[in-house]
Image: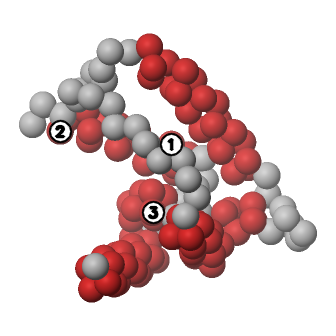
Amino acid sequence: MRTAIPSLVTGVLFGAGLALGGMTDPARVRGFLDIFGDWDPTLAFVMGGALIVMAIAWRIVPRLARPVLAAEFHLPTRSDLTPRLIGGAALFGIGWGIAGLCPGPGIAALVIEPVSAAIFVAAMLVGMAIVRFAEGTSS
């Protein structure tokens, strides 16, 4: 329960940032991806802002003994490129281009356009279940 309130606050703040930045608008996302047509650079600024924040965070994290609300940091330990990672990134990009949403903005869009976002979220959950099932049967 100690982390429930901060998690809720940061989740709401993140969702509000996605909505304010236009990431929950599939038309804006598709406009950003349409580099040879009517290109909308708005999301480049949103992504640039996110990169700046993360660059600062990656510089600060090594100097901290531990996170404020956890016993330890959970940082990536692998840096290799695997076919699974490349395939997953490609599939993510294709889905983002087709739907105009990715998981975070899709969930945040449930508040703004519940019907269309619910279709996306349902399809995303089905896809996640298929992967989980496929990985479970292959091991």
**For the residue carrying disc 3, how many other residues have a C-alpha within 10 Å: few (<14), some (14-19), or many (20+)?**
some
What is the spatial separation of the Cα atoms under label 3 and label 2, in whole angstroms?
A: 21 Å
Name the secondary structure under disc 1.
helix
**Image quadrant assignment for residue 115:** bottom left
**Percent position of residue 13, x then y:** 40, 39
Q: Which residue, given by chain and number where applicable, does mark 3 sit on? A: 103
**Percent position of residue 120, x then y:** 44, 76
- 128 vs 13: above or below: below
**For the residue carrying disc 2, how many other residues have a C-alpha within 10 Å: few (<14), some (14-19), or many (20+)?**
few
**Percent position of residue 44, x then y:** 73, 48
Q: Which residue, given by chain and number where applicable, does mark 2 sit on? A: 4
Q: Using the image as rendered, state which of residue 3 and residue 30 is in the foreground.
A: 3
What is the spatial separation of the Cα atoms under label 1 and label 2, in whole angstroms?
A: 20 Å
Q: Residue at x 59, y 67 (%)?
A: 86
Q: Residue at x 23, y 29 (%)?
A: 70
**Image quadrant assignment for residue 87:** bottom right
Q: Residue at x 34, y 37 (%)?
A: 74
In the rendered structure, which amino acid carries the disc numbered 3?
Pro
In the rendered structure, which amino acid carries the disc numbered 1?
Gly
Q: Earlier in the sequence, mark 1 or mark 3?
A: 1
From the image, state whether disc 1 or disc 3 is nearer to you.
Answer: 3
Q: Earlier in the sequence, mark 3 or mark 2?
A: 2
From the image, state whether disc 1 or disc 2 is nearer to you.
Answer: 2
Q: Quadrant of the N terminus?
A: top left
- 67 vs 32: above or below: above
Q: Which residue, given by chain and number where applicable, does mark 1 sit on? A: 17
Q: Using the image as rendered, state which of residue 65 and residue 17 is in the foreground.
A: 65
Viewed as shown, does residue 37 lie left or right of 116? Answer: right
Total marks placed: 3
Q: Would residue 120 be seen by someone viewing this image from the given angle? A: yes
Name the secondary structure under disc 2.
helix
